[in-house]
Amino acid sequence: MIIIKDIPKIQELRKLQSKQIWGFVPTMGALHQGHISLIKQAIKENDVCIVSIFVNPAQFNDLSDLAKYPRKTEQDIGILEKEGVDVLFMPEAEDIYPRDFNTIVKNLNLSDQLEGMTRKGHFDGVCTVLTKFFNIIYPQTVYFGQKDVQQLLVVKKLVYDLNYNITVKGCPIFRDSNGLALSSRNEGLTLAQIRSAAVLFQSLLLAKKIVSKGEKKSAIIIAKMEQLINQVPSIKIDYIAITDVVKLEPVQDIAGGVLISLAVYFGSIRLIDNIEIIP
């Protein structure tokens, strides 16, 4: 595996391999089985699998959250080598965002829904860093997990709007044995909290069951989910939302496919999850 930190060096390598099909898996490190599932697919479908590890400061609206984000570089490198990744790109923040950097790439609609309501500027940071990565790496395919489903939709719109010749692939959520969606943030949970966090997926399955029995009112479904989640006193609900699957706009009465999304806090650890439901 080639490890590259300098932007000119990765650009030079890409030029040398201009005829190769590159599949790109952008990450912020602290790799888990969810990341590995993306990497395996990228290796299978491309000539070259490139993974980035970059804890992107521009997508954090809370500096303390940025500071405590898990960093496990040596462990991550071992995982990537074991999986057979071809290239690891690990740029420094000052190279991605030099002192005179003052450009933002912004989605005007999708980024204001769900996560955008409580994490102001988050998707500006995501769009900006991915635009830079796409211009540096020139991948043909890029892979994202569906746990961050809003991010997936934002990236697809970014690629479409800016005319990138890139295929964006969304891969299924990878879950623990109790249903908890895997996340690098899970590193901060105690074993007891991990067990308790099973209630998140249980609440999504409850919503699916309620819809299957004919309930169409979003407010009733959300209330039932809240009732279940609030049985765990250490959990604080940030939001539960039922939206359409394209624009992520709130749905009051379910008439077609919807996305049910939630975000909760375990202390200072924030977890998200979602499920798509087709009545």
Image: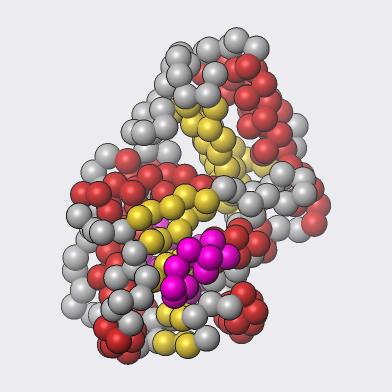
| Picture mark count | 0
Q: Is residue 264 above or below residue 223?
A: below
Residue 61 in magenta stretch: yes
| Closest to the observer, 83 or 93 | 83
Dividing the image into 4 quarters, which one contains the C terminus? top right
Instruction: Kindly give the residue lying farthest to the top in the view shown.
Output: 214
Residue at horizontal 52 percent and vertical 69 percent from the top: 43
Rendering coords of residue 230 (x, y %):
69, 32
> Which region of the structure is painted magenta?
40-68
Rendering coords of residue 198 (x, y %):
73, 42
Residue 273 falls in image quadrant: top right
| Closest to the observer, 188 or 252 | 252
Residue at horizontal 33 percent and vertical 82 percent from the top: 17
Residue at horizontal 75 percent and vertical 32 percent from the top: 231
Q: Is residue 166 above or below residue 114?
A: below
Rendering coords of residue 122 (x, y %):
37, 54
Residue 62 in magenta stretch: yes
Residue at horizontal 23 percent and vertical 80 percent from the top: 99
Rendering coords of residue 166 (x, y %):
31, 59
Residue 214 falls in image quadrant: top right
Q: Is residue 47 left or right of residue 173?
A: left
- Asked whether the viewer can see residue 113, the reply is yes
- Asked whether the viewer can see residue 128, the reply is no
| Closest to the observer, 139 or 269 | 139
